[in-house]
Image (cartoon, grey):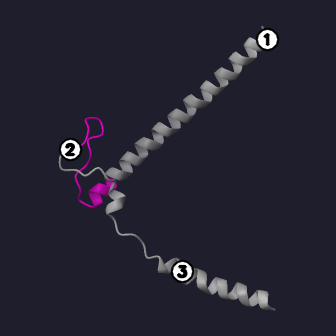
Amino acid sequence: MTELEEALASLQAENDRLVAENFALKESSDTLIEENDRLRECLEMPMLDVAGGKSSDVKSEPAVLNTPLPRESTRTEFHLPTFCVTFLTLLR
């Protein structure tokens, strides 16, 4: 009987963990929906009706995909001097 009680306790603990994780994911999802709506407003795009489906003139891609990407050269400009200093330090 103790094996069954241990299995039940284990399953209950797993269920409690999953309920808490589900709640956290729901909150995160709600936050992302609100953020996406704010981004769409900034880009002057129509918003999605999450509960009732998509409006007819809205594309299914997120608003973030419509924003310009940052320049890649900024990262390269930062890493090049660091690489040079590291290389010169190793030559000593």
Q: CA distance from mark 2 to mark 1?
A: 56 Å
Q: Amino acid at mark 2?
A: Ser
Side (left or right) of 73 relative to 63: right
Residue visible at 71% across and 84% down in the picture: 86
Q: Which of marks 1 and 2 precedes in the sequence?
A: 1
Residue visible at 48% across and 80% down in the picture: 73
Q: Position of residue 29 (x, y in %)?
A: 43, 42
Q: Which mark is residue 87?
A: none
Side (left or right) of 64 relative to 54: right
Q: CA distance from mark 3 to mark 1?
A: 61 Å
Instruction: Look at the numbered discs 2 and 1 and tell me whether their residues touch, using CB distance below 8 Å.
Output: no
Q: Amino acid at mark 1?
A: Thr
Vertically, is 26 above or below 72? above
Membership of 59 in magenta stretch: no
Q: Position of residue 58 (x, y in %)?
A: 22, 50
- Residue that badge 2 annotates: 55
Res 87 quadrant in image: bottom right
- Residue that badge 1 annotates: 2
Q: Which of marks 2 and 3 precedes in the sequence?
A: 2
Q: Main secondary structure of the magenta part?
A: loop
Residue visible at 46% across and 37% down in the picture: 26
Instruction: Look at the numbered discs 3 and 1 and tell me whether their residues touch, using CB distance below 8 Å.
Output: no
Q: Which of marks 1 and 3 precedes in the sequence?
A: 1
Q: Which residues are magenta?
A: 38-54
Out of 86 and 46, give the one closest to the viewer: 86
Q: CA distance from mark 3 to mark 2?
A: 41 Å
Q: Amino acid at mark 3?
A: Thr
Membership of 52 in magenta stretch: yes
Mark 1 residue element: helix
